Amino acid sequence: MNLRTPGPTPMPPMVVQALAQPMINHRGPEFAALLHDVTVGVQAVFQTQHDVLLLTASGTGGLEAAIANLFSPGDRLLAVIIGNFGERFATIAERFGTDVQRLVFPSGHAADPEVIAARLAADPQIAGVLVTHNETSTGVTNDLRAIAEVVRRAGPLLVVDGVSSVGSLDIRTDEWGIDVLVAASQKGWMVPPGVAMVSVSPRAWEAYGRARLPRYYWDFGLARKEAARGQTPFTPAITVLYGLREALRLIQAEGLEAVFARHRRIGAYTRAGLKELGLRLVPVDERYASDTVTAFWVPDGWTDQALAERLRVEHDVVLATGQGELSGRILRIGHMGYVSEADIDQVLAALRQTLTTRTAATR
Amino acid sequence: MNLRTPGPTPMPPMVVQALAQPMINHRGPEFAALLHDVTVGVQAVFQTQHDVLLLTASGTGGLEAAIANLFSPGDRLLAVIIGNFGERFATIAERFGTDVQRLVFPSGHAADPEVIAARLAADPQIAGVLVTHNETSTGVTNDLRAIAEVVRRAGPLLVVDGVSSVGSLDIRTDEWGIDVLVAASQKGWMVPPGVAMVSVSPRAWEAYGRARLPRYYWDFGLARKEAARGQTPFTPAITVLYGLREALRLIQAEGLEAVFARHRRIGAYTRAGLKELGLRLVPVDERYASDTVTAFWVPDGWTDQALAERLRVEHDVVLATGQGELSGRILRIGHMGYVSEADIDQVLAALRQTLTTRTAATR
């Protein structure tokens, strides 16, 4: 199967092998070494010197943890939304009783940092800004560096959903001043789902001290305290961490810059190939097109489901269908982590064959 | 390594192998089949016809989910506490703003159903009772059937932490009237940590409809809705589920009754062996001694750490040290899941050699 969804992603053979290791005591020395190796490796990829905590959860759990640890009921938050996952982040914050102000940009567009700056200037009450770095539902990447700059200038905490970008795209957590960055193992990290990674800046720790939303399982303070003695507060997803240690070695061997460059190259390659097939990209401005997931409009006469099913059954190529308001109308190709041009060639060939050899009647 | 902690537990070779499978689309047909197989298998072990939901989390996440889905701020709950994990359950409920009444029994003792009945009779405001079935910190198993009977008679919801018992001990979820039962993959299920399992009774669903505590990641309703179409709301720990499907096949092949009988037999075998060595059990009444974890007092002149370290380094036998008020004073032997008499023989031999061949001076 050529699994080309934007997560879970394929795993290199060495990662798959690493999963098949015997269980260990999560309060023993083998686990302490594992936790140390993984934490140091993740810090390097996050480009942070700050704390990185590992939670047993999907990426959404990491987002919920960020909200629960930083804020109090009624805190005003600005949710910058460019698609489904931005909307999800806002919903989580709302469910927890914060005062969420939505700043929504149309599907296919990136957020405009100047508009964010204006909103922050107009409302000094805003205590935190929630931003999706790479919007998996539309294949658009926000200019996080520029957004971080305007947020930092205004003062609120910057909380970033980096689930489908960290590990694949260049994010300078400390240099740009990101307070909390959330990642998830099943994306560019090339390992199975089950571990969320969260970096916490000193400013975020101050906010943690004041925050009054309910937290226990997500408690950053508990996680930091246990990490100091090589443990986690609750039984961790050890198998996923085995895989992550191996994947981090592979990332380190390739080199972080080379990993980022490969993603940029394959992103451009994918977009060029789709355009050659006459397909239209969802991102309206290609400068903001994502280098980890490419979304394109399905041609007239097709639904996303029908086209995805054809690709899967006839070509063993698995793409993701549309979400939210784009449901039915787009397909998404994941190209993060363990991916090369050959994988994309297969997708493009399958699309070419499916779209050109069938008449509308046989769809 | 003879991993004899009360979770994570050793895995059968076929389960280890099952982990090393390629990744799949969690919104595709292969995952729908996996989720179906696992859910049906878990329902059989839970002995329930009700909904069973799978969450990407440790067991503690499952406990937090139970609180967040069933209750509202200020709801009065009775937390029946016989050790560290009962205390943890109470703490979670407290953090979420419920009015927790603690009913604490001394370490080594089981909860007395009549005392629970009296408390419930005296306080009709109590909306839910939190009970640890098998207290991993003391090796004591509550008489859940008797407790369930008094709770059912009084009317509140019964929420049970079955993390270290479900899959190993006989729990009749529906017959006894348990509203929410929480289990975790790394215990008797013989698979890695990362998946919590939760059963939800019709009465619990009614409570869910009224409950106002904040929830998103843990939302039972979302999980049920997605499960109906073969999916999970958030990316699931697919690798752990691969292992769980295989482990459920093994449990089914052995037979549920045979699995329970083996645990009873090995529990008795472990206790007899320890007593033969002159060691004293933590449970004061052996009728309530756990058949999944045996706690014993370390002999005079030893700390738990020192004895555990000696067993680990010299015999490759890994036991768990004490927790909470028992920290420093007890060791715990896990015997749930993939365990036979031979594993216990190794533990007993290591203990015998360590305790009889060393003088106090060399400790």
Image (cartoon, coloured by chain):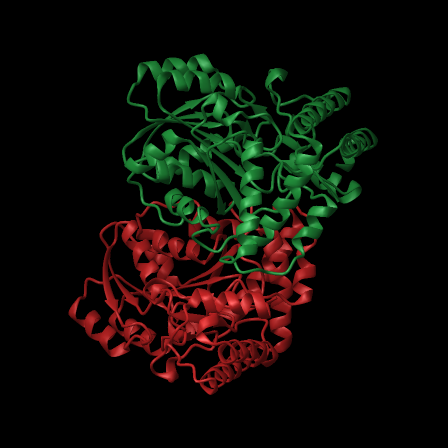
Chain colours: A red, B green
Q: Position of residue A106 (x, y in %)?
A: 27, 72
Q: Is residue B208 visible in the rendered structure shown here? A: yes
Q: Identify which residue is drawn at 62% across, 25% down.
A: B290
Front-lying residue, B318 or A356: A356
Q: Residue furthest left?
A: A122
Q: Quadrant of the C terminus of chain B?
A: top right
Front-lying residue, A322 or A355: A355
Drawn side of residue B217 relative to residue A24, left or right? left
Residue B351 location, quadrant: top right
Q: Position of residue A181 (x, y in %)?
A: 42, 64
The mark total stands at 0
Drawn side of residue B122 relative to residue B23, left or right? left
Q: Position of residue A2 (x, y in %)?
A: 59, 69
Q: Considering only vertical position in the picture, is B287 above or below A94? A: above
Front-lying residue, B113 or B305: B113
Q: Considering only vertical position in the picture, is B314 above or below A268? A: above
Residue A286 location, quadrant: bottom left
Q: Considering only vertical position in the picture, is B129 above or below B242? A: above
Q: Identify which residue is drawn at 40% across, 49% down.
A: B217
Drawn side of residue A131 relative to residue B242, left or right? left
Residue B74 location, quadrant: top left
Q: Considering only vertical position in the picture, is A295 above or below B135? A: below
Q: Identify which residue is drawn at 38% across, 32% down.
A: B204
Drawn side of residue B123 relative to residue A304, left or right? left
Q: Is residue A236 visible in the rendered structure shown here? A: no
Q: Quadrant of the N terminus of chain B?
A: top right
Q: Position of residue B311 (x, y in %)?
A: 75, 39
Front-lying residue, A86 or B78: A86
Q: Residue furthest front?
A: A361
